[in-house]
Amino acid sequence: MSFPNIPNITASITITRDNVLNLLLASIAFEELGLSHIINAEGEKIQYALGLIPGLKHPSSITDLLNVNDSVRRTLDSVTKKELVLQSKLQNIIDLLMDEKKKTICN
């Protein structure tokens, strides 16, 4: 049995610093969009449990409401942690841009 021939693949991508910063900003925007959908879903979960959205046939018990509350709290805790990471990522981009601006002014 012989070994397969694997072509020599070299991945080379040319990308500018501006392109990188734009891609990073876009990635933050898309993550924020995803988080907004999660937050909206959690709000709808609460509305459904409280009977504010049509379709609830039986009213939620106190236990059900407490379980929903705990679930929403845990989810929002995770969203908050992700927001902190995104804020740090954005601040790093801002710092890079400000450093570049300072270098341009000094030269």
Image (cartoon, helix red, strand yellow):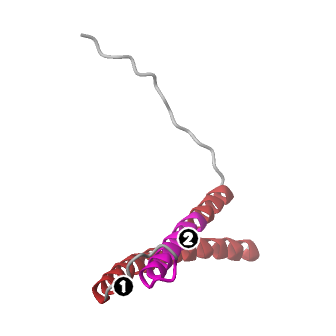
Q: Which of marks 1 and 2 is nearer the N terminus?
A: 2
Residue 82 location (% of width, % of height): 44, 74
Q: Which of the two residues, 45 or 9, is positioned nearer the viewer here? A: 45
Q: Is residue 21 left or right of residue 6?
A: right
Q: Residue furthest top?
A: 1
Residue at 51 percent across and 71 percent down: it is 35
Asked if the magenta segment contains residue 42, the reply would be yes
Return the residue found at the far bottom: 62
**Which residue does the numbered mark 2 point to in the structure image?**
32
Q: What residue type is labelled 1?
A: Asn
Report x, y in % for residue 50: 44, 85
Left or right: 50 with respect to 103? left
Most common SS among magenta residues: helix
Badge 2: residue crowd in 10 Å (few <14, some 14–19, many ≥20): some
Q: Which of the 4 quarters of the picture holds residue 33? A: bottom right
Vertical placement of 34 versus 67: above or below? above
User: Which is closer to the viewer, label 1 or label 2?
Assistant: 1
Secondary structure category for the residue under label 1: helix
Residue at figure coordinates x 46%, y 25% from the top left = 8
Decide if residue 61 is on the left or right side of residue 56.
left
| Amino acid carrying mark 2 in the image | Glu
Nearer to us in this view, 17 or 47: 47
Residue to which mark 1 is pinned: 69
User: Start and end of the magenta stretch?
Assistant: 29-53
Quadrant location, the N terminus: top left
Identify the disc placed on residue 85. none
